[in-house]
Image (tube, rainbow, N blue to C red):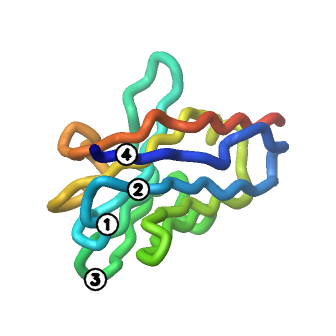
Amino acid sequence: EVQLRESGGGLVQAGGSLRLSCAASGFIFGGYALGWFRQTPGKEREGVACTSSSDGSTYYADSVKGRFTISRDAGWNTVYLEMNNLGPEDTAVYYCTADSVFCDITSPSGMDYWGKGTLVTVSS
């Protein structure tokens, strides 16, 4: 059974930092592209960051470039999202996702697997 379990969300003040973690199981971690998406009530799920399975390339939404960093640890089957200089606009439920082919930051519908999400709230 495939599982993606996010953790690390919480309440933080504007300007602060959080690190999200996603523990993966049930599939060959190294063969999958991984990513983070986020969603707020009434809005569509949007891509935040992706990392490929082949060469470790990373992709970021313009809104988080320079502030967020995605990384993967094959030894722990975990993908991370380091978030710095957070603002209220980053408040959302953050979802971990995996795909056997490609993580398309513009298209959540193409991803194979999803976690249940972790809430990040940034206070002003």
Q: Which mark is residue 73?
A: none
Q: Which mark is residue 3?
A: 4
Q: Is residue 20 above or below residue 65?
A: above
Residue 52, picture quadrant: bottom left
Quarter occupied by the N terminus: top left
Residue lying furthest top in this view? 42
Q: Residue at x 26, y 58 (%)?
A: 27
Residue placed most toward the observer, 38 or 80: 80
Marks 3 and 1, how far apart at CA: 14 Å
Q: Earlier in the sequence, mark 1 or mark 2?
A: 2
Closer to viewer: mark 3 or mark 2: 2
Marks 1 and 2 close (CB-CB < 8 Å): yes
- State the image coordinates of residue 58 (x, y, percent, origin top left): 38, 71
The secondary element bearing badge 3 is classed as loop
Specify whether 113 is left or right of 64: left
Q: Earlier in the sequence, mark 2 or mark 4?
A: 4
